[in-house]
Amino acid sequence: MPSSPLSAFQFCGVVGEDDDEEQKDLSFLLYEIEDEPNWGLRDDEKSGFRVTHLVFEEVEAAAIVDSKSCVGRRERRNHRRCHCGGGEWVEGVNGDTKRESMADGSKKKKIPNINFTNLFINGDFVHSISGKTFETIDPSTEEVIAKIAQGNKEDVDLAVKAARQAFDHGSWPRMPGYMRGKIMNKFADLIDENLEELAALETLDAGKVFSFETAVDIPSISKELRYFAGAADKIHGETLKLSSEFQGYTLLEPIGVVGLIIPWNFPSAMFILKCGPALAAGCTMVVKPAEQAPLPALYLAHLAKLAGIPDGVLNVVTGLGHIAGAAVASHMDIDSVSFTGSTEVGRLIMQASATSNLKTVSLELGGKSPLLIFVDADIDQAADLALFGSLANKGEICVCSSRVFVQEGIYDELVKKLVEKAKTWVVGDPFDPSTRQGPQVDKKQYERVLSYIDHGKREGATLLIGGKPWGDKGYYIEPTIFENVADDSLIATDEIFGPVMALMKFKTVEEVIKRANATSYGLAAGIVTNDLNIANRVSRSIRAGIIWINCYHNFDSGCPIGRYKMSGFGKDHGMEALQKYQKTKAVVTPIYNSPWL
C-alpha cells in the first residue's frame, strides 16, 4: 500500500500489456513503498515538487518514471509497460491523499488531505480570533471531513481592513488592466493544472459528481476567469457631446471593497462568477463561502496567492451565515455586496444594506423555473431535457426546471418515457464514474427535500417514481417524479432544491404562458418545440432572466443572465456582470472659444 507521496510527475502516456490491449491516458502519483525500495522516483526523493493532478480510482499498479530521462520503467506487477508521451515537472500544491473504504467494502477511493482550513486574510491563512471552529461534513458518509476556522465579526473586520488598504493604497486598482488580466490568466492556468484536486474537494464537501466536475464544472470556471481577464483592459467610459459650451466624459471606476457571499451548491463556480468580474474591475474583496462547503473557496484562495494576486485583494472568511455573513452584509466599510442564495436571506441582505451604509446590492435568489414541452417536440429529447433540467446536481441548482408542463397530445407518451429514463438515473457514490446523482449537501437539506415529497403525497399528487431515501448511509434521495400536481400545491410553488419534478398537463399556448408566469420567481425557463412561431412568442412572454429553447442549463461566459421578480436583480456572466463592481463618474469641463460644439 502506498505511504506518503514523495513527489509527482504530471505524466501523459499510455499503458497496456500488449499492442491489442486498449490503451488509456494516465495522470498519477508516484509513491515510495516500504517493502519495495525501488518503487518510486530515483534520485529525487526530496525534490520538493508537489502534485497538481490526482487520479481518484484504483488502478492495478502505476508506472515508474525516471525523472531525468522520462523513460518508462517496468512496474512491479503484471509487467505492464508505461511509455512516456511527454510531460513536465510542475510546481503545484500539496496533493497528499488518504484512503477511505466504500460503504460495501468492495473497493476504495482516494481523497485529498485537507490542507487549508483557516481564514485567508491579507495573503495568509490565519486562525480565527476566537479560535472557534465548525465541522464540514462529507454528505456521502455523514462523517466529518475537517474542522474549519469559524470567523466572526472581528475576523470580518480584519479582512475588510486588509481589503480597504489594498484598494486605497495597493497596486491592484492602479495596475493597467492588461496586467490584471495577465495575473488572472495565471490564476486560470493554476485552476486547470489542479483541476482534479479542486473537483475532488467539491465532490467531498458538497456531494457533487466527480466525473461531471472534472468534465464540465471546473473547466468552465477557468474559462469564466479567462473571459474576465480579457475584459480587464477593455473597461472604458464614453465621450459626451453636451448641449452647451462644455465637454464631458465618463469614467468607469472600481466600486471599492466588495463583499461576496456564495452558496454551497456550486462552490467553485460561484466563487469565480463573483470574483472574476470584481478582479477585472479592480476591486478588492471579502468572500464568505457557505459553511456547508467551504473547502473549495479556501483552495481557490491558495491558488490566487500562487498566481500573484496581491495580498489583501482577495480575502476569504469562513464561518456561519448569521454571524460572518451578516457581518459582511452590514459592514460600514464594504461598498457593495453580491449574494447568491435563498430569497429569505436576500431580504436580510437588503435590510442590512439599508441600516448600514446603503451599499449597493446584487442578488441571485430562488427560482421555480418552468419547462414547457409542446406537442411537436421530439419525445426522447424532451424527456432527456426534463430529467437533466430537474435532476442535474441533485436538483440543487437555482434554475432547476422543477415545473414541467407537457401539452396534452404527447403527455401520456412523455410520462412513460420519463419514468423509463428515470429508472436508469444512477444514484450513488459521487466519485464513481457511473453515478449521475450524489447526496444532498447536508442533513438539513436532505430532510427539507423529504418533507416536500411528503407534502406532495398528502396534497394529492401522484408519485410516479422515487420519493424515498436511497441507501443506508449518506444524504441520498431517489429521483422523484410527481404527476397530477395542482398549480397551487407546495411542490409547484416552493423552491425545493432537490431531485423532485412536478409534471403538469396543458392544452393551449395561452394557458401555459399564464401558468408558467404564475410564480413569485423569474430566474429561468425552458421551451421544447420545433415551431419557430411558438418559440418566439413564448420566449417573449415568459418573465425570466434566461430562456433556453431546445436545451437547458446551457450557461456561457459571454451570455448575461438576469432575474425577474423575487429571483433578485443584477447580472452574472457577460460584460454586463462588470456593472455590479463599477461606478460611473461624469466629468464636465468648460470649452472656451471652441470653433464647434
Image (tube, rainbow, N blue to C red):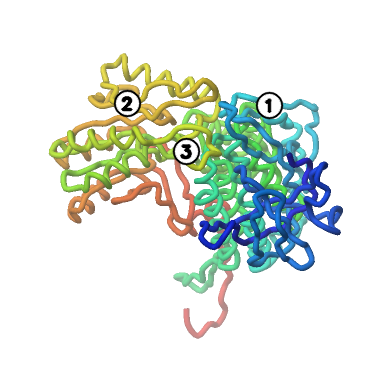
Q: Amino acid at mark 1?
A: Glu
| Left or right of residue 584: residue 42 | right
* Residue 262 visible to the viewer: yes
Q: Residue at x 26, y 25 (%)?
A: 485
| Left or right of residue 495: residue 206 | right
**Rendering coords of residue 333 (x, y %):** 69, 42
Residue farthest bottom in this picture = 595
N-terminal of the two: label 2 or label 3?
3
Q: Amino acid at mark 3?
A: Thr
Q: Is residue 480 above or below residue 563?
A: above
Callout 3 secondary element: loop
Q: Amino acid at mark 2?
A: Ile
Q: Residue at x 49, y 70 (%)?
A: 240
Where is mark 3, residue-wise?
435
Q: Nearer the viewer, residue 488 or 414?
A: 414
Where is mark 2, residue-wise?
465
Q: CA distance from mark 2 to mark 3?
A: 18 Å
In which quadrant of the rendered image does the N terminus lie?
top right
